[in-house]
Image (cartoon, rainbow, N blue to C red):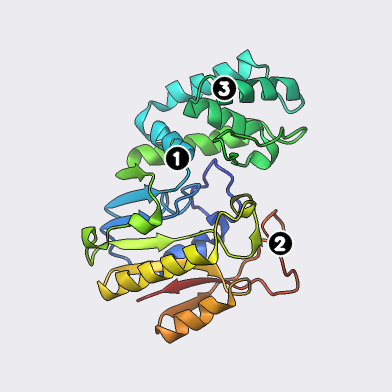
């Protein structure tokens, strides 16, 4: 069956586009506000059916970029991207031009359009910042570019953003105010996975303390009768299965693996058990 879901033009490790045909049918049919707590590339938020969407992510540069795409005319944004490609002679082989634009972005102009243009020419089109907030992905030599396929993907995605009643926020998940949600709303969590090797965990970006805080927040939501779903992998996070079963939450096993991308488990012998845990 052909996957007709819109794919984000942002390449997030562990992104959920391939899982959407399995995940979204498990969501409730009647969603008031859809809260995408760890929005990432917005693959889920842009495809879900709801009255409104609240996209949230901790990476402020990505939130600003998506908000910019939503708030500005598509043709204008495309012209801006093309102007930087032309000015810096960006190609699959011009590393010097890429590094020059990256330096300009980091030192002089934090434009969301420049950031997206860099992502198009970066290694694996990925997003990564150092502790100073500088974009530090290397050049994607002979692979990455704003090619026609990526351009069409970008156009489709941004057009859908314009059609959505979507708000972009940049908050730590711990500050989610449960009292501002009602029983018609629905919250989805796709947090960083524990014990995995990915750009967001290179410097210990997600730890067991944060995991515990998130699970406590989900218990709080459940007690308030707010529906939610949690994506995770119980082969790398075996305690999560016990937690879900103890609280009588449902575990939906999904048919998928990340073995073909840079999302790798530290214990490669474990079977890839991708799940969606729900409280309904």
Disc number at residue 107? 3
Whether residue 164 can be seen here: no
Between 5 and 135, the one nearer to me in the picture: 135
Q: Give whichever of discs 1 and 2 has the lower sequence position.
A: 1
221 left or right of 97 in image: left
**Is the residue under label 3 in contact with that under label 1 (CB below 8 Å)?**
no
Q: Position of residue 254 (x, y in %)?
A: 56, 71
Q: Position of residue 122 (x, y in %)?
A: 67, 35
Q: Single out the mark in the foreground, 1 or 3.
A: 3
Between 223 and 260, the one nearer to me in the picture: 223
Q: Single out the mark in the foreground, 1 or 2.
A: 1
Residue at (38% x, 35% y) in the render: 70
Q: Secondary structure at mark 1?
A: helix
Whether residue 149 can be seen here: yes
Where does label 1 land, which residue? 60
Q: Can you say which quadrant of the picture contains the N terminus?
A: bottom right
Identify whether 251 is placed above or below 154.
below
Between 60 and 232, the one nearer to me in the picture: 60
Identify whether 47 is placed above or below 88.
below
Disc number at residue 259? 2
Crowdedness near tag 3: few (<14), some (14–19) or many (≥20) residues, C-alpha within 10 Å: few
Q: CA distance from mark 2 to mark 3?
A: 36 Å
Q: Secondary structure at mark 3?
A: helix
Crowdedness near tag 1: few (<14), some (14–19) or many (≥20) residues, C-alpha within 10 Å: few
Residue at (43% x, 61% y) in the render: 189
Residue at (45% x, 34% y) in the render: 65
Q: Position of residue 273 (x, y in %)?
A: 61, 73
11 left or right of 45 in image: right
Between 180 and 50, the one nearer to me in the picture: 180
């Amino acid at each position: 069956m052909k996957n007709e879901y819109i794919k984000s033009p942002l390449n997030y490790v562990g992104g959920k586009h391939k899982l959407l045909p399995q995940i979204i049918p498990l969501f409730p049919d009647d969603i008031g506000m859809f809260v995408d707590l760890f929005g990432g590339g917005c693959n889920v938020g842009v495809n879900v059916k709801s009255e409104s969407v609240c996209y949230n992510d901790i990476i402020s540069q990505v939130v600003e970029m998506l908000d910019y795409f939503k708030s500005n005319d598509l043709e204008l944004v495309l012209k801006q991207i093309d102007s930087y490609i032309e000015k810096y002679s960006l190609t699959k082989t011009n590393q010097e031009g890429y590094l020059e634009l990256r330096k300009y972005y980091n030192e002089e102009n934090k434009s969301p359009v420049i950031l997206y243009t860099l992502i198009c020419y970066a290694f694996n089109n990925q997003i990564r910042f150092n502790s100073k907030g500088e974009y530090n992905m290397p050049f994607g030599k002979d692979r990455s570019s704003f090619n026609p396929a990526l351009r069409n993907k970008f156009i489709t995605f941004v057009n859908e953003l314009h059609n959505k009643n979507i708000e972009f926020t940049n908050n730590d998940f711990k500050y989610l105010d449960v009292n501002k949600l009602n029983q018609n709303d629905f919250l989805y969590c796709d947090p960083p996975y524990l014990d995995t090797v990915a750009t967001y965990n290179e410097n210990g970006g997600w730890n067991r303390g944060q995991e515990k805080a998130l699970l406590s927040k989900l218990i709080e939501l459940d007690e308030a009768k707010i529906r939610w779903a949690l994506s995770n992998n119980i082969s790398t996070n075996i305690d999560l299965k016990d937690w879900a079963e103890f609280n009588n939450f449902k575990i939906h096993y999904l048919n998928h693996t990340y073995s073909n991308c840079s999302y790798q488990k530290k214990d490669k012998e474990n079977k890839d058990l991708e799940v969606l845990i729900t409280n309904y």
